[in-house]
Amino acid sequence: MKTDTIKTIAKKHDPKRPLAKNCLMSFIFGGSLCALGQMISLFYLYFFDFSEETVGDPTVATLIILTMFLTGWGVYDKIAQVAGAGTMVPVTGFGNAVISSAIEHRNEGFVLGVGSNMFKLAGSVIVSGVFSSFVIAIIKTLLA
Amino acid sequence: MRIMCLTIVSLFLLTSCQADTDTPFNQQLKATYPDIHVVESIVTDDVIYVAMIIKPLKQFSEQKIAADIKKDLGKKYPNHLVYTSSDMKATIEVRKQTSPLTQERLNQLISYDQSIEKDD
Amino acid sequence: MVISVFVAFVVGGLICTIGQLIIDVFKQTPAFMLSLFVVIGSVLDGIGLYEPFIDFAGAGATVPITSFGNGLVHGALKEAEQSGLIGVVIGMFQLTSAGITSAIVFGVIGALLFKPRS
């Protein structure tokens, strides 16, 4: 009974999230990042030897280099406050998580500080990705 | 704000820049296969290479469309080796091709044909 | 060709909006949402739907974190075709090295170049 009362009180004080505005902002910023990625892809398709299948790799690498500068100058966090998921979902969000942890902990030394703190967020992404891919690939190979 | 408007306007101007008028072969291809948005082709005595960009909404099945067109053209021109590609890179490369086709260049273009099983 | 930029904008925006909905409506943490997206990417490639999705949306499908899951499964399956079941563990990182390597390398370079702000 007590837990029910606590839950109702907690629900009353839940911060109101402006859902429509958040969704619009993530749409605009996330879409713009992907549009920028597409322009970078077209650049690589025109001037380098990548095909449409392989152009994703240099695009991702270029975006992460861009993220390093935006994170280092503090711009990325300001954008992330407005855009929410629009800056988390693209691969730049992954890059920002790794790079900002690296920069923050650099005073603790490179091996202990930077090295062990870099993958706080990225770790869960990589672990779940690799394990689920392992299961899916095994199932698909056994069924084929 | 102004920069955003300038970018959007310049993007629209770029979309209106089409390549020079299509060759008769390209026009015929566009008429026969309505899914094609942009097409560039190279026709020699033994080889037909068609690089295409499929209409945006149909791009989900673009590889299948390119494979079907390849089979169709293979039947129409039995004396030629037919290759097709829906890869944007193929269109870019064929557009750049102004000199006669060498075997090396052809091999590079064939690598963009996704219906061929590659032996690694 | 330029129309691909607009398609990428719309598709990428939609994926990010779905992520925002997961955080706001289902009250989940960002780490959960990102892990879920990677798993979704893996599942979609297992079914064989992610590659046509990349053909359709271009960077709208390769930039979001879902492409990570796709790359992992794709590499694993490619190697499994040649080497059998053990190929799954051999091939997994072959196509995704771009993202992870760049993040690590530029994380270290960033730590060398920039000062912490707090």
Image (spheres, rainbow, N blue to C red):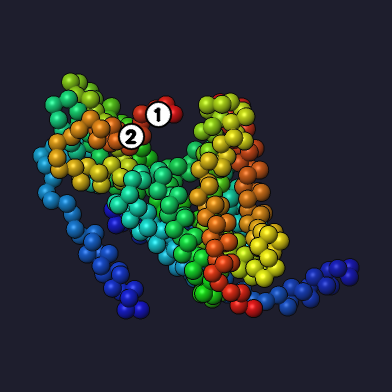
Real-space Cα distance between discs 2 and 1? 9 Å
Which residue in the structure is indicated by mark 2?
B111
Chain identifier of the residue bearing label 2 in the image: B
How far from the left and from the top, in percent, is residue A30?
A: 47, 64
Q: Residue furthest right?
A: A1
Mark 2 in CB contact with mark 1 (< 8 angstroms): yes
Q: Secondary structure at mark 2?
A: loop
Chain identifier of the residue bearing label 1 in the image: B
- Tell me: B97 left or right of C81: left
Residue at 53 percent of width and 47 percent of height: C97
How far from the left and from the top, in percent, is residue B20?
A: 13, 51
Location of the N terminus of chain A (image quadrant): bottom right
Q: Which mark is residue B118?
A: 1
Residue at 35 percent of width and 59 percent of height: A39
Q: Secondary structure at mark 1?
A: loop
- Tell me: C53 left or right of A45: right
Residue at 20 percent of width and 33 percent of height: B102
Residue at 39 percent of width and 27 percent of height: B117
Q: Residue furthest top?
A: B79
